[in-house]
Image (spheres, rainbow, N blue to C red):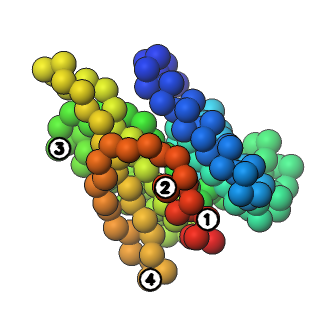
Amino acid sequence: MPQTPYFREKVVAETVRQLGNWNIETHQNGGVTSSQGGFDFNVKGQRTIRAPDVAFTSKQTDRNLSAIQGWTFQGQPFTPMFVVEVDCIKSESDFQAFDDRFRNELFAPGTSVKLGFLISIGKNNNNQDIQNIHSWRRYENNTVHHYEHGWRDMNTKILSFIYFMK
């Protein structure tokens, strides 16, 4: 696994911290993982292990995992309900790669992902700041929509959105 630049990893750590705090403060009692926590997304019948930068797994899924599922990548596949990726989108092709990954892997049929964020932060080729948040949301009819948000604090407004997705 390639190493992550320091500033990007700080964003990941802060997102994990805020999601962990939200998990406790709202009594969700689910599981919060960072990029070392992998999931078997089982895309199109193929074992596809993915480790989002940040993920939240519901209490129900977390508590119903067998030891085999929790300690290995064997057993029935399971996925989180919320995922976050942190990167720096510098071009349309960069964005397209993430859009494809979100739509075709993270939100593939059979996964339980309902909401995903891409936090795009860094410097472009002209040394200008890039700060943007993209979200993908799965609706009840299984369609996935993409939204682009400006830069804002990912505190309660965005995290409370997850609460209403149950």
Instruction: Classify 156 as above or below 114.
Output: above
Asked if the residue under mark 2 is in contact with the one under mark 3, i.e. CB atoms within 8 Å, the reply is: no
Q: Measuring 51% from the left and 24% from the top, which residue is drawn there?
A: 10
Q: Earlier in the sequence, mark 4 or mark 2?
A: 4
For disc 1, the marked residue is: 163
Q: Measuring 17% from the left and 38% from the top, which residue is drawn there?
A: 91
Nearer mark to the viewer, of 1 and 4: 1
For disc 2, the marked residue is: 158
Tell me which amino acid carries mark 1. Answer: Tyr
For label 3, the crowd category at 10 Å Cα-Cα, with few meaning under 14, some 14 to 19 and many 20 or more, is: few
Tell me which amino acid carries mark 3. Answer: Glu
Q: Position of residue 74 (x, y in %)?
A: 73, 50
Tell me which amino acid carries mark 4. Answer: Asn
Q: Earlier in the sequence, mark 1 or mark 2?
A: 2
For disc 4, the marked residue is: 141
Does residue 111 show up?
no
Query: Is 144 positioned to the left or the right of 154 in the image?
Result: left
Q: Measuring 60% from the left and 41% from the top, which residue is drawn there?
A: 18
Nearer mark to the viewer, of 4 and 2: 2
